Amino acid sequence: MSDIPLERGAVSVSTRRVGTRLPARVIVALICWLVIAIMAWPLVMSFLASFKPEAEVTAVPPDYLPHSFSLQSYLKVYGYQAGLPTYLFNSFMVAFLTIVFCLALAVPAGYGLARFHVPFKEVLFLVLLASMMIPYQALLTPLFLMFTKLGLTNNHVGLAIIHTILQLPFSVYVMRNAFEGIPRELEEAAIVDGCSPLQILGRIFMPLAMPGMVTVSLFAFIMSWNEFLAALIFMSKETAFTLPVLLTGVIDSFYGSVSWGPLQAGVVVSVIPCIAIYFLLQRYYVSGFLSGAVK
Amino acid sequence: MYANSSRYVGLLFMTPALLFVAVFVLYPLAHLVYTSMTDASLLGGGEFVGLENYVKAFSDRGFWRSLWFTVSYTLYITPVLMGLGFLAALLTTENTRLKQVTRGAIFLPVVIGLATSSFIWLWLFDQQVGLFNRLLVDFGILDKPLVWFRKADLGQLAVIISVTWKIVGFGMILMVAGIQSIGDDLIEAAMIDGASYWQRVRRIILPLAARSILLATLISAIGSMLAFDQFYIMTGGAPRGQTFTSVYWIYQNSFVYFKLGYGSALSLILMVIIMAGAAVQIALTSRKGSS
């Protein structure tokens, strides 16, 4: 190995030592690219396979890249059972309702926790975090009995309630932090001006706590969109499936004629909103992630 | 200072959320305890049977096998996730352009669903059309494509590979935050003292990031103990029920065999195990606020 002097300025902390052999930096860069390739590979392969014509998807052994372009797989998924639009609508509707429920419950709760003296506040806070300690998987049986009676199975509102149970602790946590970060002077000025607590919440706090609300919505969407077990149990009717449940159907039903193409097309459709949101709102996502888990 | 009446105003704001938790978490929890002592099934029934379901659970080989399988899965995957997560955090903790892109790439699969990622890997692992098999053959690691899901240990390995890809970024991002919160001056002081990179990692970064690592380990272990999606989709419990996880076994009993009473008892047993872990997690989480 040869000693090559390091460039000045562009040197990173870990290689700043005098006399470090340059390859360290190059090797690190190469490892980075290798890792990026490994992480991207499954998604890229799935994406490319979704555009292969059927003969190519079912070829043994398979080729990595498509030789021709085809929308056959997408058309098959599009026409599957009740049709893709129905399933997209189900997934979006449940996710949307989950966001609405989470905000409607967590914004006032976070405000109450952050800004008022409440008797037994920390105990009540722990009650709100209860579903963090109790795995929802264990509650699905009683909830299923309850929702069957209430007619909330195979129902967007029903599944959104389950997803809200899952997401509420995080949402309350984020909103409490968001409201606690707002300077007290603003609130006092509003009280002097004669605003009621509700007006203060609506006119002053909510606009300032917008980043917190974006974080809550973002996580509610991604969780709800991807959640599988409750959707599998509560959305058993063919017309009520959400996308992940639909995919189990796609794979089962085309057995024999092998369904790998449509499955990958379905995967691409399911993945796109998540990835788009991740790229658009990465800032909120990573910070929300850390505040929810670490703080 | 607040006016005296505002304590009730604050409570008023919390009421909707508290009611929601009471109706959809606490009441079902009480109902779960009750149902676990009945012979309820989806088709009716519901006679009180006392602790019979629990007695049955203790002699239910399927349940013990699923619990042991879940524990072994957790014991295998957690060190893999944390070890690779820590290495990924070391690799990408600086904020250079390339390292940020790398961090983003490692974190990307975290946002797609576990079910979705399992569907991708189910296909990649397929013996006939699976590109992962093809890749392993092309690299000379395998002689010919493997049937991954006919043997329990191979199936488990396949799931571990796929879940590692999907979730390794989660531990990484927690540890990046832990490492970044260590002051630069401390690390630079060690460098001036002539500590090598790996010495700095072992003596400074590892001990000071220990709390984030422990937290990531707990969250990850709890998640693994509750595994369902990946096994339902990739192994389907095959072969002969050897890859049923606990949640999967409960799902089978409650929603496939319709034994709701028995499924409730199993749920409660699992819940007690999980809650012990979650309690530790919350204790760790809230300690930072007081320090």
Image: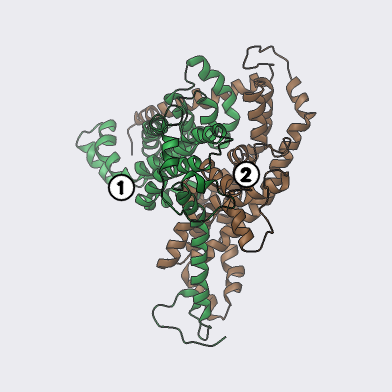
Q: In which quarter of the image is residue B244?
A: top right
x%, y% of residue B153? Answer: 72, 47
Instruction: Examine the rendering and report whether any part of residue B110 can be seen.
Output: yes
Instruction: Examine the rendering and report whether any part of residue B113 can be seen.
Output: no
Q: Name the residue under label 2.
A: B224
Tell me the residue at 53%/83% (across/down): A21
Q: In which quarter of the image is residue A141?
A: top right
For label 1, count other residues whose C-alpha is less than 10 Å away and answer few (under 14), some (14-19) or many (20+): few
| Distance between mark 2 and mark 1 Cα atoms | 41 Å
Q: In this view, does B40 lie above or below A6?
A: above
Q: In this view, does A114 lie above or below B88?
A: above
Q: Mark 1 points at which residue?
A: A183
For label 2, count other residues whose C-alpha is less than 10 Å away and answer few (under 14), some (14-19) or many (20+): many
Q: Residue A251 carries which label?
A: none
In the rendered view, does A20 fall on the left or right side of A200?
Answer: right
Q: Chain A is drawn in which colour?
A: green
Q: Is residue A158 above or below residue A260?
A: above
x%, y% of residue A8? Answer: 40, 83
- Frontmost of labels 2 and 1 is 2
Q: Using the image as rendered, state which of residue A263 and residue B37 is in the foreground.
A: A263
Q: Chain B is drawn in which colour?
A: brown
